[in-house]
Image (tube, rainbow, N blue to C red):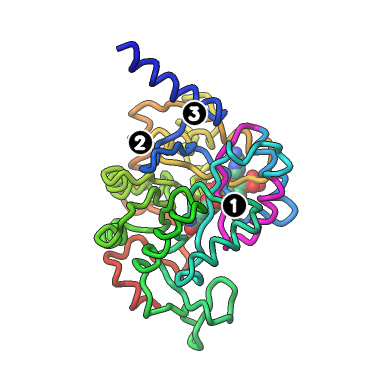
């Protein structure tokens, strides 16, 4: 009994010494992932470096970035300015869709901009290969009819197989996906040597993704919630049920929105460039099973809502990965 306890305590203390924010989950690689990350999408130039610095100084140890956000340089500056050693930070970036045929290049661009030589987690941003040769738009190249220029001779499965090779380079500690429905994951797992460590999707009380969360858990895939506050302007903070639960628990509505997900063992990525809000988003509380159940069913009927659902992306409600070759 005693040696087991000591071993447990050692892991616990080690986690805590590296990561001031207390709760973390285990990836299928064995690494710890802190459950609250700073989101960096739409953090305007000139603001994001300060936001990253403020977040790290207030205790964050997980930063969520992407090549597509166009601000990885500044994230790198913020990390440097914080004085927090790179080894204490769980740093994530994402492979953009125009790099599906060449993840090595996409990764290197992110590493160079972030000023680091490895990522703790590298995600396939969307399971949608776009034609990287078409320079009509830096993010979503289009055809003459305005449709997204899908790379129809390439599949996200092949992309994944290329990403698997990145592990041996030591430049990524773990790989995962984003915006993958159950059907996308099922197809991927038929061909994968490495099970994705994480799946990052839009998840919040009006889009709780209960089934997808269960599926990810059953496969040992950590589920991550983007837009946990409802994205720009944090509209979910005005939901009546959220306000009531906040009042009952004597905390801010934002604390309820984030705690709801962390209580479900889901990683949250709140974005803020405001130091006070950045710090308050680290405040996670235990919610009662009743409160969680209320939030689980807030979207029942016709209240389900997506805030980040670009027309060129894959609607998670689509069933079947073959939608890739037919969607406009
Ligand atoms: P969030 O749900 O995190 O909401 C961000 C908005 O909430 C901003 O307007 C922010 O304003 C405001 N806000 C943050 N904290 C508070 C607070 N405590 N009180 C009041 N307002 C607050 O939206 P995002 O869509 O940005 O999602 C979060 C992150 O998820 C992204 O930044 C990105 O890292 C990731 N993401 C990933 C996607 C993917 O495809 N994989 C897609 C979308 C997002 P302010 O900054 O002024 O505080």
Residue at position x 50%, y 26% in the image: 14
Mark carried by residue 294: 2
Looking at this view, name the residue that lies furthest to the bottom.
144
Residue at position x 50%, y 35% in the image: 243
For the residue with label 1, is its CB less than 8 Å from the closest atom of ligand 1? Answer: no
Is label 1 or label 2 in front?
A: 1
Residue 192 in the image: state x and y as whole percent.
30, 59
Q: What stretch is highlighted in magenta?
A: 58-78
Q: Earlier in the sequence, mark 3 or mark 2?
A: 3
Residue 245 in the image: state x and y as whole percent.
45, 31
Residue underneath mark 1? 117
Q: Nearer the viewer, residue 311 or 151?
A: 151
Q: What element carries label 2?
A: helix
Residue at position x 71%, y 39% in the image: 82
Residue 166 in the image: state x and y as whole percent.
45, 58
Mark carried by residue 95: none
Q: Is mark 1 on a helix, strand or loop?
A: loop
- Between marks 3 and 1, how big is the CA–CA gap? 22 Å
């Amino acid at each position: 009994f005693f040696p087991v306890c000591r071993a447990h305590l050692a892991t616990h203390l080690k986690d805590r010494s590296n990561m001031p924010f207390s709760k973390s989950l285990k990836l299928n690689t064995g690494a710890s992932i802190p459950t609250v990350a700073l989101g960096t999408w739409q953090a305007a130039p000139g603001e994001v470096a300060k936001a990253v610095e403020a977040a790290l100084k207030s205790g964050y140890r997980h930063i969520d970035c992407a090549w597509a956000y166009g601000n990885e340089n500044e994230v790198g500056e913020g990390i440097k300015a914080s004085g927090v050693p790179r080894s204490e930070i769980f740093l994530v970036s994402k492979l953009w869709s125009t790099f599906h045929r060449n993840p090595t290049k996409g990764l290197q661009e992110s590493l160079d901009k972030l000023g680091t030589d490895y990522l703790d987690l590298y995600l396939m941003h969307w399971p949608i290969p776009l034609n990287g040769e078409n320079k009509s738009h830096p993010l979503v190249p289009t055809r003459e009819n305005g449709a997204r220029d899908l790379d129809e001779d390439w599949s996200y499965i092949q992309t994944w197989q290329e990403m698997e090779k990145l592990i041996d380079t030591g430049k990524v500690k773990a790989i995962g996906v984003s915006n993958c429905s159950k059907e996308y994951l099922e197809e991927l797992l038929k061909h994968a040597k490495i099970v994705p460590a994480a799946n990052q999707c839009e998840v919040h009380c009006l889009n709780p993704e209960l089934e997808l969360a269960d599926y990810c858990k059953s496969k040992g895939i950590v589920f991550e919630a983007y837009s946990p506050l409802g994205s720009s302007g944090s509209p979910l903070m005005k939901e009546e049920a959220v306000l009531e639960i906040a009042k009952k628990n004597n905390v801010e509505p934002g604390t309820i929105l984030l705690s709801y997900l962390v209580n479900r063992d889901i990683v949250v990525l709140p974005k803020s460039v405001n130091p006070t809000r950045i710090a308050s988003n680290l405040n996670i509380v235990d919610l009662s099973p009743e409160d969680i159940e209320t939030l689980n069913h807030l979207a029942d009927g016709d209240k389900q809502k997506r805030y980040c659902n670009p027309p060129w992306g894959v609607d998670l409600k689509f069933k079947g990965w073959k939608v890739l070759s037919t969607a406009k």
